[in-house]
Amino acid sequence: MRNLPVNLKRHLAALAALLWLGGPAVAEPVPAELLERLREAPEGQQAERISAEVKSYWSRSGSAAMDLLLKRGREALSEGEFELAIEHLTALTDHAPDFAEGYHARAEAYFRSELYGPALDDLEMALALNPEHYEAIFGLGVMLQELGYSRRAAQAFRRVLTIHPNHENATEALLRLKREGIGREL
């Protein structure tokens, strides 16, 4: 195995992990009452804690092997190794096609690699699987703004705030757009 290309070794390791740790992922849905608590949470630590709990649900694929691929993809992303992140997250989405967080994480890796088409495709898939995924909606807003669709970006940021009213980044992005005269409601 020493003479194999690095990316082939990674795919073999992912496949071995899949076989050793279990089958396909079946993500646990976020309880509706948790999302309701997020909508009603006062600004501050309570909202942040509930948001972290929601994100924890999103990160549970139902498979230890898939969770490991997500972890490795996120680590590579945080280290700026976008190509490696895309490899791990592609293995994840290939083996767990119903796991929204895999697409969301890979969308970020694509975006940071300036691969906007694939990033948009992955955000679309993440939102098809989980329409309440406010981080994917926020990512869509960022991309829309980046591509010059400021009004649509404002709509996305407002949608984030209907799910998570204390989402700091969406609030700031919407305020910036409003200062520019975009996103004001009539």
Image (cartoon, rainbow, N blue to C red):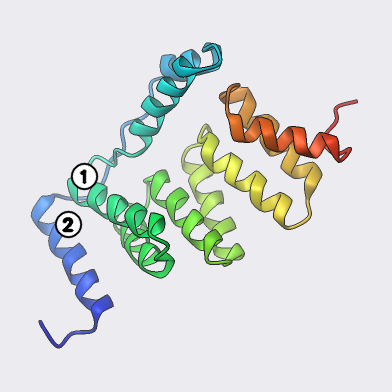
Q: Looking at numbered disc 1 in the image, what kind of residue is underneath it?
A: Ser
Packing grade of label 1 (10 A; few <14, some 14-19, many >=20) is some
Mark linked to residue 18: 2
Instruction: Indicate the position of residue 95 as horizontal and vertical percent values.
Output: 29, 57
Mark linked to residue 27: none
Instruction: Indicate the position of residue 156 as horizontal and vertical percent values.
Output: 68, 38
Q: Is residue 29 left or right of residue 7?
A: right
What element does badge 2 sit on? helix
Q: Looking at numbered disc 2 in the image, what kind of residue is underneath it?
A: Leu
Out of 44 and 17, give the one closest to the viewer.
Answer: 44
Residue depicted at x 29% and y 42%: 61
Quarter-of-image position of residue 63: top left
Residue depicted at x 54% and y 11%: 42
Q: Are marks 2 and 1 in contact (CB under 8 Å)?
A: yes
Q: Quadrant of the C terminus?
A: top right
Residue under label 1, please give it.
63
Whichever of labels 2 and 1 marks the residue nearer the N terminus, that label is: 2
Q: Give the number of callouts.
A: 2
From this view, report whether residue 9 is shown above or below residue 61.
below
From this view, report whether residue 44 is shown above or below residue 140.
above
From this view, report whether residue 184 is shown above or below residue 41.
below
Instruction: Indicate the position of residue 127 as horizontal and vertical percent values.
Output: 53, 42
Packing grade of label 2 (10 A; few <14, some 14-19, many >=20) is many
Q: Is residue 63 left or right of residue 27?
A: left
Quarter-of-image position of residue 12: bottom left
3D distance between C-alphas at marks 2 and 1: 8 Å
